[in-house]
Image: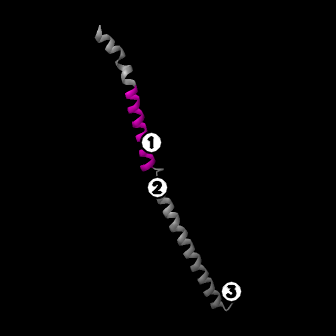
Amino acid sequence: MESTTFQKGGFYKLLPFLSLVLLICLLGVYFGNLLFGTNSLSVLLDIKDKESQIRKEVKRLMHENANLQKELFELKGLEPQ
């Protein structure tokens, strides 16, 4: 008789533990994806770094363009505006 009561309540005693294990696994997958997935923090930081590099390149090219325009006007004998 005692073995039937142990069998009957065994699953319900393990249910909180199994729920906790499942919750920990789901949180692990979520945070793993957040840190290492395609939309992760490292990808965001890489994109911000690339954006900074592109902005610097644009400024450099605009400055170079202005200098070349000035040189062109000087070669044509015109005054820059």
Instruction: Give the CA separation, mark 2 to mark 3.
Output: 44 Å
Is residue 76 or residue 6 the one in the foreground?
A: 6
Q: Which residue is found at the position 35% from the left and 14% from the top?
A: 8
User: What residue does disc 2 label?
Assistant: 43
User: What residue does disc 3 label?
Assistant: 80
Name the amino acid, label 3: Pro
Q: Which residue is found at the position 50% from the left and 68% from the top?
A: 53
Magenta segment range? 16-37
Name the amino acid, label 1: Tyr
Q: Which residue is found at the position 58% from the left and 78% from the top?
A: 63
Label number found at residue 30: 1
Local secondary structure at mark 1: helix
- Measuring from the top left, give residue 65's x and y in whole percent: 59, 79
Quarter of the figure with the N terminus: top left
Report crowding for label 2: few under 14, some 14 to 19, many 20 or more residues within 10 A (C-alpha): some
Left or right? Give the position of 8 relative to 37: left
Name the amino acid, label 2: Val
Left or right? Give the position of 33 relative to 79: left
Q: Which residue is at the far bottom? A: 77
- Measuring from the top left, give residue 72's x and y in whole percent: 62, 86
- Measuring from the top left, give residue 64's x and y in whole percent: 57, 80
